[in-house]
Image: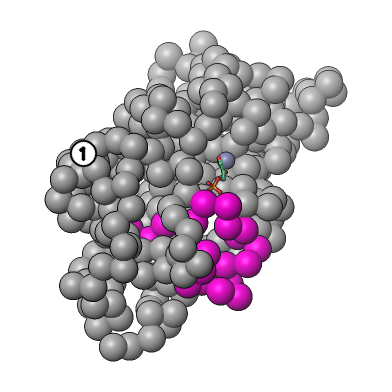
Amino acid sequence: MKNILEAPFMVEAVRTLTNLYRLGWDERNGGNLSYLLYDEDIEGYLDTTKVIRTIPMSFDASEIAGKVFLVTGTGKYFKNVQYDPENNLGILRIAADGKNCELLWGYRDGGKFTSELPAHLMSHMVRLAIDPSNRVVMHTHPTNTIAMSMIVGPSERDFTRALWKMQTESIVVFPEGVGVLPWMVCGTNDIGIATAEKLKETRICVWTTHGIYGVGRDLDEAFGLIETVEKAAQLYMLTVGCDRKNEIKDNELKDLAAVFGLNYKTEYLD
Ligand code: 13P
Ligand code: ZN
């Protein structure tokens, strides 16, 4: 077997988690990540016939039984992932009954998957139905997005418009807008169901006064989406209370959408 710490998916995930920590978005154990692995990613790196232990889940994921995910551990710090991936991350396979998962690697100290597993796996299920190439669900706590959620939300129209008007790039990167959930208790099946429902319409879901979910076909795509939202939120927060003279106007956003051929949420523009 080759060293799994050198597998391209692992190297990329560790770099991404380290970057998220460095951005200041993942204080303490904040944030979590799940990454759908294909057979070719793990072939030669992992003996998939060896199950370390079986861990029960609180919901039914039979729709994705047999799929294998790299998942951050609960209570683990993104800060520490690069120094000890095997303790802070796990690779798990959804068991045939959909109610358990089989640990194939990681969580070395006896730990388990993130408390947000319901939101992650429910989101994977809805996104895979929309886009079979989706592989990543990323949850993080970007500072300005959270700050903005105290001022704008929970209207998705208001939140999306505010983001679109801050910078040209916003409507290009997320033309479908953003989903926004009101504050809810995290780590529950309920917030998982609500998040997955939002992610049927958009690839971004803001959790008011908590953080954000982003999805994508790879780590770059999910990160890039969140990064673009956070940049717009930062611009919003830097100018909140100011007499903004140059927000992008609705007709300008329409011109941009026409030239770029964007399939944007038309109800969000006046
Ligand atoms: P976990 O440590 O269980 O991943 O929780 C962190 C978090 O961000 C909760 O929303
Ligand atoms: Zn969180």
Give 84 or 240, whichever is nearer the viewer.
Answer: 84
- In x, y percent, where is residue 12? 46, 69
- In x, y percent, where is residue 187? 49, 36
Give 164 or 13, whichever is nearer the viewer.
Answer: 13
Q: Please identify the residue farthest to the left as the structure is shown.
A: 96
Quadrant in which residue 62 is drawn: top left
* Residue at x 56% of width, y 74% of height: 84
Which secondary structure, mark 1? helix
Residue 177 shows in this picture: no
- In x, y percent, where is residue 78? 60, 60
* Residue at x 62% of width, y 33% of height: 210
Q: Please identify the residue farthest to the top as the structure is shown.
A: 270
Quadrant in which residue 119 is drawn: top left
Left or right? Give the position of 259 relative to 139. left
Residue type at numbered disc 1: Ala
**Magenta stretch: residue 87 in it?**
yes
* Residue at x 63% of width, y 67% of height: 80
Q: How is the image coloured?
A: one colour
For the magenta stretch, what is the residue range? 69-89
Residue 68 shows in this picture: yes
Left or right? Give the position of 13 relative to 143. left
**Magenta stretch: residue 222 in it?**
no
Quadrant in which residue 97 is drawn: top left
Answer with the quadrant where ligand 2 appears in the image.
Answer: top right
Above or below residue 250? Residue 130 is below
Q: Residue at label 1?
A: 129
Quadrant location, the N terminus: bottom left
Above or below residue 56? Residue 93 is below
Q: Crowdedness of circle 1 by 10 Å Cα count: few (<14), some, many (20+)?
A: few
